[in-house]
Image (cartoon, coloured by chain):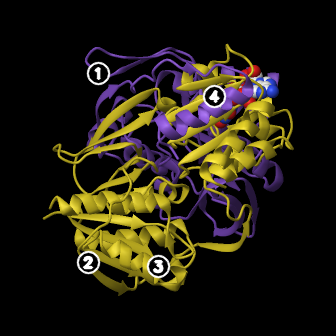
Amino acid sequence: MNIVVLAKQIPDAEAHIDIGNDEKGLTIEQKFTANVFDEFAMEEALRLKEKHGGKVKVITLGAGKATEVLRTGIAMGADEVLLLEDGAFLNGDGYTTALALSRAAALEPFDVILCGRQAIDDDRGEVGPMVAQFLGIPHGGGITKLDVADGNATIECPVEGAKETIEVNLPAVFTAQKGLNEPRVPPIMGVMKAMKATIPRVTPADLGISPEEAGASGSKVKTGRYFHPKKRAAVQMIPGEPNEAAVEAVRILMDVERIL
Amino acid sequence: MANLLLFIETKDKEPKKASLELLGEAGRLKAAGRYKIHAVVMGGMSEDAKKKALTYVDVLVNITDPVLDQYTPEGFALALAGYAKEINPQVVLASATQLGRDFLPRVAVLLGSGVASDVTEIRWSEDPITFVRPIYGGRVLSEISFTGYPAVVTVRPNTFAGEEPGTENGEYLERQGGIAPEQLKTRVIKTEESGKGKVNLIEADIIVAGGRGLKSAENFRVLEDLANTIGAAVGAARSVVDAKWRDQEDQVGKSGKTVSPKLYIAVGISGAIHHTMGMDTSKLVLAVNTDPNAMIFSYADYGIVGDFAQVVPAMTEEFKKRLGR
Ligand SMILES: Cc1cc2nc3c(=O)[nH]c(=O)nc-3n(C[C@H](O)[C@H](O)[C@H](O)COP(=O)(O)OP(=O)(O)OC[C@H]3O[C@@H](n4cnc5c(N)ncnc54)[C@H](O)[C@@H]3O)c2cc1C
């Protein structure tokens, strides 16, 4: 079985983020980590391979630190990696990212594409469903269980107030969320192998994408400016014994804030 | 006049709260003469809901293919994009519920567009229209616009002011999406209800969330009582989900859900950034914690230093008294 994982290296949740004076760019502290949902995707891909054979290929789009997520993939047990690296790929939106990743995934026949439910830096959550639509295949969103047999997959997806069991014809895209598995810690041998691995790269031309269709040029959505949300006023502590404080809190919520 | 297309999400043939918010906004845009409003619903609405929706929109379209009786991302995307291609709207609007965020990206690709996901503000009068969305867990807001239309947009629940009664009546249409069952490669096998009657976290006006400070699964009863009294949903920090005190479904935060209620009551939650990333856009936050230095107080408007076991039941009692319940 050919399994493709789409994964992204993102700034750590605690990394400092500064907005430039022109409000057009962000300066982000160089602390990076694999997107948490992509780790669930990676783990599930490896489990599928362990059960059904085949290979796992991890693909990412990006520059610089982006390669780290591919090395994490190799360290965890992926067979192949691919980096979409070119100036023309950069600063794209969900559309151009998904277009490029869908072409890269389809360079070879595949059965399953796994990725995270969303990247928690830009929080778009678009890439999985868009990749599926570009490839004209089904997707299962936010899965917590995946079983594959006879060209079909049975998945579980928690939806509001319910758990659905869904059957999907392969090939298909699945977006992973917490609850699917516990990602393994890469063994030390894997980490050493990953350090030495050479990383193959492709450009838009290799994927049949013109520079105008890639990255910032091809984006349908453009960012104008960044700004900080309005700061919350300093907390007002409600003093008193637990009982008094509780009664006062209810008074504030009802009479001052008029919430209820 | 340009067209605006709304997707109305229903549960048991009633529009979800988040969809009523979209209808309210649509009604205001219609009254301002800004757009001709079209709304699409899959598989019908109750008579009352239909009547009400018709006061906000110009055209209400019920797409009735049997394959749309159950949600599949492929089916809903084909149906909504199919109608959009006919009317060529400037904006396609849906709620950023789990379902909306799942299939609108497919609609966008079908329409050759991108998506603005989980938007928290729309500036209709700017040209091009500007959409604001939080990134990095709400630490930064970005202003975005589309290079061409249609703009496909999902809006975070609780973004638009509530509905106001609409007046004029729109037109009601029934139609088929023309989707053959063979086109769909996704089949729903079964649905197990896990929390009937439970208030949905993403759409809730009020959330009462608990963390490890609650000490046990049983103690969540105290939060359930408060939540039931004030019609709130119950959320949880990851710590208590990992400890299996609460379902994964209830988790708020970076690896859980992003919520934006009018009021978020954080009980026994320390306020780690991974948690606050999921709740920092709540309009008002009240934190209850024994530790006066807990980080959560930096994310709160009001704070009580105290033991949940004393504070929360006293709040519940007081609410009951004042609300006459
Ligand atoms: C990759 C990653 C993703 C994560 N994703 C999430 C996520 O989505 N959501 C999330 O919540 N966390 C997430 N976390 C975990 C997060 O970092 C924190 O560990 C977690 O939020 C802490 O949960 P807590 O506040 O319940 O527990 P604790 O940090 O243990 O805090 C318990 C609090 O309860 C208070 N307390 C104790 N007794 C009482 C009492 N009797 N009455 C009142 N207060 C009391 C204490 O003072 C303390 O502040 C993630 C972590 C990582 C690494």
- Tell me which corner region of the image, top left, top right, bottom left or bottom right, holds residue A224: top left
- The residue that disc 1 covers is A23
In which quadrant is the C terminus of chain B drawn? bottom right
Chain coloured purple in the rendered structure = A
Residue A39 spot, x, y in % from top left:
68, 37
Q: Nearer the viewer, mark 1 or mark 4?
A: 4
Give SS at disc 4.
strand
Amino acid at circle 2: Asn
Question: Which sits in the foreground, A250 or A144?
Answer: A250
Amino acid at circle 4: Ala
Residue B261 spot, x, y in % from top left:
52, 43
Q: Do the residues marked 4 and 3 share a common chain?
A: yes
- The residue that disc 3 covers is B45
- B287 shown above or below A128: above
Amino acid at circle 1: Glu
Q: Colour of chain B?
A: yellow
